[in-house]
Image (cartoon, grey):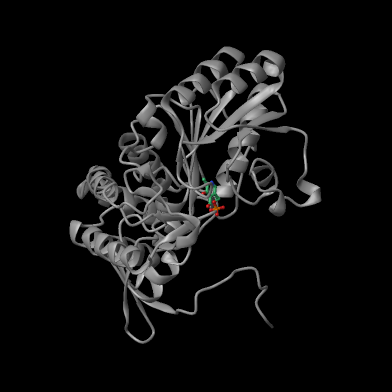
Amino acid sequence: MKLFDVYPINPIEIVKGVGSYVYDATGREYLDLYGGHAVISIGHSHPHYIQRITDQLNKIGFYSNSIEIPLQKQLAELLGKVSDKKDYQLFLCNSGAEANENALKLASFYNGRKKVIAFKGAFHGRTSLAVSATDNPKIIAPVNETENVIFLPFNDEDALEKIFAEQGEAISSVIIEGIQGVGGIRVANHSFLQKIRSLTEQYNAIFIADSVQCGYGRSGKFYSHDHANVQADIYSMAKGMGNGFPIGAISISPKIKPWFGELGTTFGGNHLACVAALAVLETMEKEQLVQNALQIGRYLMSELKGFDKIKEIRGEGLMIGIELPEELNQVKKDLLFKNHIFTGEAKPNVIRLLPALNLGKKEADRFLEALSERLRSYK
Ligand SMILES: Cc1ncc(COP(=O)(O)O)c(C=O)c1O
């Protein structure tokens, strides 16, 4: 049997990871500023993480949501504390798309409406409604096409006001990444997020903060939407939550009341996923990783501003986009194969930095030197 060939892959086999470094089968070391697509939050093979998962595996790995799983309550309590949302409610699932799917569905259950506002450049996942709210027609199958999703220009307050004035009573939810990831590291204006908050409040629509990529401390605040001082009704999360262990979740405002059977999952909230997520939050607290993301991110951004060949630097904390001119489209590849540094990308020519939140200054400097070398090598 062959693999279903959907991924363009680099010819590198990673067999080991420690902190912000990964190693291939020949023993070559790479600096990992990609974190397997923003997933590695506390670093590869963190000892506390390994210990927690190993201990749990020696007890029990899985049982379904039909029994008491105190680890879920511990996770809800700690997440409530760290994210400063103690009165919110936690629903656990397995991925980012699933988190958004549940968020959109829950909003519709709440207000009985059908229309979803999403934005140009958005990526919310590949399941049915999440993909329909994703601005990429290529990955929307005919069966997922719907008139219920309305795309508006990102950061356009007038367009938002207009749609609410016209269709406010039909709008169920507005879903927005605080910083668009796949869209090329585009930061939502604070006033735009505040406008979404006031209009959704006014029209009884639900504000969904997609925090799958920009959340969980990556931006230097727990949720990137916190930079704008707004409280969303639902936060969706995944990626950094389990440091590689598949887990997703939504954090739900107390105004949304649950009923038995409203949402459900077989694997979501299993014992192993919960300890992985607990280990991540415990480490984030103990090692002050949100603060580190803010500091190292600021350092990187300010140094990068001195590079004259860069078109634009965007982002917050350790979610950084470096937009390069079209003719420098080899840089990402050369960073990987010549400097042995993993980075992410976005179209048309943006290098995305999504490293572990405990990235050190030494690693940041290694990247800055490598990028400077790369940029000098092209005339
Ligand atoms: C902002 C955002 N939302 C949702 C998703 C989907 O997450 P998953 O791939 O875990 O389904 C992603 C994945 O890249 C994402 O970046």
Report the side of 122 relative to 171 (left or right).
Answer: left
Question: Viewer-proximal residue, 153 or 149?
Answer: 153
Report the side of 145 relative to 97 (left or right).
Answer: right
Image quadrant holding the N terminus, namely bottom right
Q: Residue 78 is drawn in which quadrant?
A: top left
Q: Which residue is drawn at 40% across and 62% down?
A: 343
Question: Viewer-proximal residue, 62 or 17?
Answer: 17
Figure check: 92 above or below 164: below
Report the side of 158 relative to 245 (left or right).
Answer: right
> Can the viewer see residue 240?
yes
Q: Residue at x 35, y 61 (%)?
A: 33
Figure check: 103 above or below 35: above
Q: Position of residue 226 (x, y in %)?
A: 37, 30
Total marks drawn? 0
Question: Viewer-proximal residue, 203 or 302?
Answer: 302
Q: Where is residue 334 in the image (x, y as percent from the top left)?
A: 40, 71
> Can the viewer see residue 86?
no
Q: Residue 109 is drawn in which quadrant?
A: top right
Q: Position of residue 221 (x, y in %)?
A: 32, 37
Q: Which residue is drawn at 33% across and 31% down?
A: 84
Image quadrant holding the C terminus, namely bottom left
Furthest toward the right, the residue is 142
Question: Viewer-proximal residue, 206 or 174?
Answer: 174
Furthest toward the front, the residue is 379
Q: Where is residue 157 in the image (x, y as percent from the top left)?
A: 54, 21
